[in-house]
Image (cartoon, helix red, strand yellow):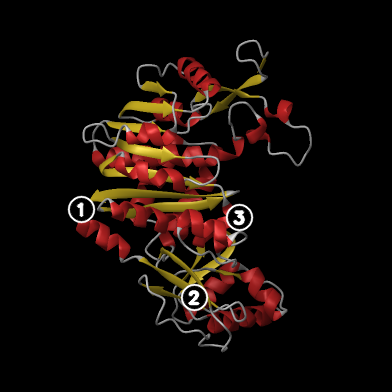
């Protein structure tokens, strides 16, 4: 169903997502060449690829509401077309208020339209200002939100400080980072500037991206004597997503900072290890397995990247809501529950086999082989061809070689 550009001055169309219908820019009208990124060309930002992100956000908000067992307030500082915020108001039980903000006047107009289109007007409040200004105005007690979802175009780092201050004690913060090139080591200086940590261009860079983002959150929150507890994270398409609960108190902040540290990686033999603490003075320079030079990434978050109870609640909500991509979401949540996140860095079997000049065995067989030798092993949600294990890199390569010989 396509509308003319009479109402808003540009081509639009109505799409369905979740339980709602939404007016959005007709993206095809703004692309002149295949290489152009359509969402950034439209007068109001809309990215259909982020539907999975929004689906999980709805589940997380409902799971959080059931945990606190009371009515909650939510804030979306970057509303765009308002899809996420309206879905919060319509699909999540126990939401009393959703504050939706955008610095674009056209975006606010579409947000208001979509709110009326979905009969969500009683719960939604509109703001038209800078995101940091909005959040800072809610930094005082009794003005803070239960949930804040920071989903900008690019890095969320400039908004973390004001978002943390605008959260109630025990509140839920959701962060999306789409600037994967800095986080994955393509532009390391940009990552250091934005997130305060050095990235590594490794096969498990998407996990490191989540840890860099979580580490940035933990260090910023600690300045305000606030601790964080990461309850879920995932990576999909072109972004990484982190959900964390905040807890007030200097001791809670200190506990969070104890999860900070560095990752040491050998690009020759795949060895990796982690070291807690914020000092690099006692780090070895050579790999303990092959003697090559070790590369250092961080500081970043070394704690768990998911909470099993929270993920289980998310999975239960996913089964009840029966979303379009429910199977994919449930699989991601099951993987998160079975992963041992304290073992930093997964192994990509394809990359190991390329280095060993071997055919690629199945992930399942490699996992089974590692478990037979007494190691922890599981697939990872960050890469469909990845395996997380506490086994040394040398043993993992031996198991991969063994499974290939059996197949032959």
Give the residue at x 31% y 66%: 258
Identify residue for label 1: 249
State the image quarter where residue 253 is shown.
bottom left
Q: Nearer the viewer, residue 372 or 299?
A: 299
Residue 382 x, y percent position in the rendering:
53, 58
Q: Are marks 2 and 1 in contact (CB under 8 Å)?
A: no
Quadrant in which the C terminus is drawn: bottom right
Residue 142 position (above or below residue 275): above
Identify residue for label 3: 181
Give the residue at x 20% y 59%: 251
Identify residue for label 2: 264
Mark 2 vs 1, N-terminal side = 1
Residue 80 x, y percent position in the rendering:
52, 29
Q: Do we see residue 211 in this rendering? A: yes
Q: CA distance from mark 3 to mark 2?
A: 20 Å
- 405 on left or right of 283: right
């Amino acid at each position: 169903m396509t509308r003319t550009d009479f109402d808003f001055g540009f081509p639009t169309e109505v799409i369905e997502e979740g339980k709602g219908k939404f007016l959005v820019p007709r993206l095809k009208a703004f692309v002149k060449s295949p290489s152009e990124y359509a969402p950034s060309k439209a007068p109001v930002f809309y990215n259909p690829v982020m539907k999975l992100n929004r689906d999980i956000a709805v589940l997380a908000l409902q799971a959080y509401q059931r945990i606190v067992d009371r009515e909650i307030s939510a804030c979306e500082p970057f509303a765009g077309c308002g899809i996420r915020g309206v879905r919060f108001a319509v699909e999540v039980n126990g939401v009393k208020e959703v504050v939706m903000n955008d610095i674009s006047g056209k975006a606010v107009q579409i947000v208001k339209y979509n709110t009326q289109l979905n009969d969500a007007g009683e719960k939604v409040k509109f703001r038209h200002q800078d995101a940091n200004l909005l959040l800072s105005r809610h930094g005082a007690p009794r003005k803070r939100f239960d949930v804040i979802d920071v989903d900008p175009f690019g890095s969320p780092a400039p908004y973390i400080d004001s978002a943390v201050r605008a959260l109630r004690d025990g509140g839920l913060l959701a962060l999306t980072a789409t600037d994967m090139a800095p986080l994955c080591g393509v532009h390391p200086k940009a990552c250091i500037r934005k997130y305060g940590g050095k990235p590594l261009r490794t096969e498990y860079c998407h996990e490191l991206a989540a840890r860099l983002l979580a580490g940035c959150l933990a260090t910023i929150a600690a300045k305000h004597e606030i601790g964080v507890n990461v309850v879920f994270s995932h990576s999909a398409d072109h972004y990484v997503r982190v959900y964390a609960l905040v807890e007030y108190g200097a001791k809670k902040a200190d506990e969070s900072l104890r999860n900070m540290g560095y990752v040491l990686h050998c690009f020759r033999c795949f060895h990796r290890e982690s070291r807690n603490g914020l000092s690099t003075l006692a780090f070895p320079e050579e790999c303990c397995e092959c003697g090559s030079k070790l590369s250092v990434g961080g500081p970043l978050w070394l704690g768990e990247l998911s909470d099993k109870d929270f993920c289980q609640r998310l999975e239960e909500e996913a089964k009840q809501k029966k979303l379009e991509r429910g199977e994919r979401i449930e699989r991601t949540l099951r993987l998160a529950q079975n992963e041992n996140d304290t073992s930093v860095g997964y192994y990509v079997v394809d990359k190991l086999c390329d280095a060993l000049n071997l055919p690629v065995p199945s992930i399942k067989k490699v996992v089974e082989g590692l478990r037979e030798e007494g190691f922890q092993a599981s697939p990872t949600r960050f890469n469909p061809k990845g395996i997380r294990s506490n086994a040394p890199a040398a043993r993992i390569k031996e198991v991969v070689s063994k499974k290939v010989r059996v197949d032959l």
